[in-house]
Image (spheres, rainbow, N blue to C red):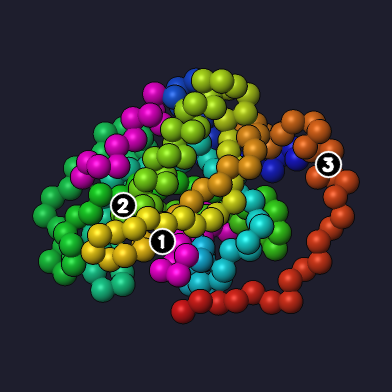
Amino acid sequence: MTNLVTFKGANLPAVSTLVTTLRSLNVDAGGVGTVIIKMDKTGHWVFGADQTEVEDDSTWAINPYSFLHGFVAWGEGEVLGEAMAPLSEPRPEVGVAPADAKKGWESQVGLSMKCLSGEDKGLEGRYTTTSKGGKGAVQELAVAIAAQVEKDQTKPVPVVRLKSGSYKHKNYGKVITPLFEIVEWISLDGKADEPAAEAEAEAPAEAAPAGRRRRG
């Protein structure tokens, strides 16, 4: 699995600095091959302008240095303004929201990931969210990475499957939420434990799916 997780960007800080940074994520306060990834209202993860569905069993490596916080202003289906910064820095200051912003400035968090398996292997994506469930999922993932780094600094990268969960809202009923299902931890150069790597190498190749669905 060597070099599977070569994230964009250079001069990354020491792994040990991740713990304080990741635990500081407060969700309550206000390149080539990179796509926007999101979970639609039906609970399907999709990416790109064509809303291509993410393969159910594909795995994605989360860049532990990519967590961002800040603000976004949405109009009618388009971003009118966005101000984001790494967790190691204060959230950006914003002025008056754009006149056509539906909700003014909204608190937003985000991260980057890279696909490690399936049709989309090598694809890099950016996920941002303003929803309560989405921010909770990002915060939970950040805390999990911080705990992992405290335990084993050699493998700070979580490999996840993109799933969905839900909670019951007193007014809206069942609300579907994003879920990052951690399946293993690997190093920044993509190395996992040897047994896992050997097992993957011996596994038979899966047949390519007949087609990819697009979601409106």
Residue type of the residue flagged with mark 1? Ile
Residue drawn at (16%, 59%) of the image:
104
Q: Which mark is residue 132?
A: 2
Q: Earlier in the sequence, mark 2 or mark 1?
A: 2
Q: In terms of image quadrants, where is residue 120?
A: bottom right
Q: Residue furthest bottom?
A: 216
Crowding around mark 2 (Cα neighbors within 10 Å: few <14, some 14 to 19, many 20+) is: few
Q: Which mark is residue 176?
A: 1
Q: In terms of image quadrants, where is residue 140?
A: top left
Q: Residue 32, how many percent across, how many down?
A: 56, 57
Q: Residue 125, how many percent across, how many down?
A: 52, 55
Q: CA distance from mark 1 to mark 3?
A: 34 Å
Crowding around mark 1 (Cα neighbors within 10 Å: few <14, some 14 to 19, many 20+) is: some
**Which residue in the structure is indicated by mark 3?**
199
Q: Nearer the viewer, mark 2 or mark 1?
A: 1
Residue type of the residue flagged with mark 3? Ala
**Up-down: is 191 above or below 38?**
above
Q: CA distance from mark 2 to mark 1?
A: 11 Å
Residue type of the residue flagged with mark 2? Lys
**Segment tinted magenta in the rendering:** 20-43
**Up-down: is 115 above or below 147?**
below
Q: Earlier in the sequence, mark 1 or mark 3?
A: 1
Q: Secondary structure at mark 1?
A: strand
Q: Secondary structure at mark 2?
A: helix
Q: Residue 115, how many percent across, how many down?
A: 62, 52
Residue 129 visible somewhere in the drawing = no
Q: Nearer the viewer, mark 1 or mark 3?
A: 1
Please tell me which residue lies in front, 1 or 130: 130
Label 2–label 3 contact, CB within 8 A: no
Crowding around mark 3 (Cα neighbors within 10 Å: few <14, some 14 to 19, many 20+) is: few
Q: Is residue 42 magenta?
A: yes
